[in-house]
Each structure stands twice: as structure tokens, then as C-alpha cells.
């Protein structure tokens, strides 16, 4: 798990830096919305890393990770259930309400996850 934490820290930092650079370039000169693609790439890296950590028996899950897990899983499961139950309007309307609240929080969750990864790296 130590090796994973080390590589994960560098990967997450690299992806976050690339996202910030692309965001600045996109806003300043490109103005094409390419930063959304980078945002979803960063979210994919966070999700894979998160899933590895949550299912690892060797990873000590601190309270900050548990809070992040609850918020992140609520958003991910709501998205999945909307896709699965797209024909049921009651379920999709309720879950859409959850997403309306949750989606604006995702940048904050991304920053929190970077802090968690950094703290784990510092503990090594």
C-alpha cells in the first residue's frame, strides 16, 4: 500500500496541475470548453484511486476519508441510479435534486481528496 500511496500522490498531483493549466489556457485563449474534459479525466483518476483505497484492507481510513467517501458515493450512486431508472420519474426527480446539491460540491470534494492523498503521502 505504501507504493500505491506514493504513486497515487504523484499521479493525483500531476493530473490536478494539468487540469489547472488546461483550465487557465481554455479560459484565457481557447474558449472551447476543453477544461470540462480534463475535469472528467481528473474525476476518473479520483474515482479509481478512491475505489482502490476503500476496498483495501491495508489502508487506514481516517475520518476525513470516511466523510469524503459518504459524499462522493452519494453523488456517484445517484448518477448511476438515474441512468438505471431513467424511465421512473419519481426516482429520477428525487435523485436529480440530490445531484443539484451534490454536483456544485464536486470541486470542493476534488480539493479535499487531494488533501487526503497529500496527508497520506506525508505520513510515509
Image (cartoon, rainbow, N blue to C red):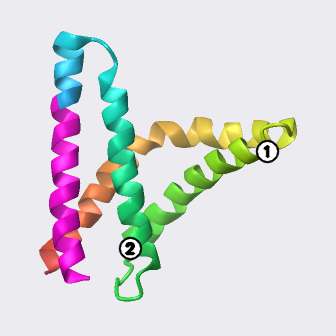
Secondary structure, magenta segment, majority class: helix
Where residue 27 sits, quadrant-wise, is: top left
Instruction: Give the mark count.
Output: 2
Range covered by the magenta-colored residues: 1-21
Badge 2 or badge 1: first in the primary sequence:
2
Left or right? Give the position of 44 relative to 95.
left
Left or right? Give the position of 87 relative to 15.
right
Residue 62, image x, y percentages: 37, 77
Residue 35, image x, y percentages: 30, 27
Q: Who's the residue at 48% across and 64% down the image? A: 69
Magenta-span inclusion, residue 17 = yes
Q: Examine the rendered structure and indicate whether residue 29 appears above or below residue 59.
A: above
Toward the viewer: 23 or 48?
Answer: 48
Q: Examine the rendered structure and indicate whether residue 26 appears above or below residue 6.
A: above
Where residue 95 sits, quadrant-wise, is: top right
Q: Which residue is farthest bottom? A: 58
The residue indicated by pointer 2 is 53
Q: Examine the rendered structure and indicate whether residue 76 appears above or below residue 68.
A: above
Q: Who's the residue at 52% across and 57% down the image? A: 71
Q: Who's the residue at 62% across and 54% down the image? A: 77
Residue 79, image x, y percentages: 62, 45
Q: Secondary structure at mark 1?
A: loop
Q: Secondary structure at mark 2?
A: helix
The residue indicated by pointer 1 is 85
Residue 10 visible, this angle: yes
Q: Which mark is residue 45?
A: none
Residue 97, image x, y percentages: 69, 38
Q: Examine the rendered structure and indicate whether residue 26 appears above or below residue 60.
A: above
Where residue 57 sits, quadrant-wise, is: bottom left
For label 1, the crowd category at 10 Å Cα-Cα, with few meaning under 14, some 14 to 19 and many 20 or more, is few
Amino acid at each position: 500500500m505504501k507504493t500505491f500511496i506514493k504513486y497515487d500522490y504523484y499521479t493525483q498531483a500531476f493530473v490536478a496541475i494539468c487540469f489547472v493549466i488546461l483550465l487557465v489556457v481554455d479560459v484565457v485563449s481557447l474558449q472551447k470548453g476543453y477544461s470540462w474534459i480534463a475535469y472528467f479525466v481528473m474525476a476518473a483518476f479520483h474515482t479509481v484511486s478512491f475505489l482502490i483505497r476503500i476496498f483495501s484492507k491495508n489502508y487506514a481510513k481516517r475520518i476525513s476519508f470516511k466523510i469524503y467517501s459518504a459524499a462522493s458515493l452519494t453523488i456517484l450512486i445517484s448518477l448511476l441510479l438515474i441512468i438505471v431508472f431513467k424511465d421512473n420519474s419519481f426516482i429520477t426527480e428525487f435523485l436529480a435534486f440530490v445531484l443539484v446539491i451534490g454536483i456544485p460540491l464536486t470541486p470542493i470534494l476534488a480539493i479535499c481528496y487531494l488533501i487526503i492523498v497529500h496527508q497520506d503521502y506525508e505520513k510515509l
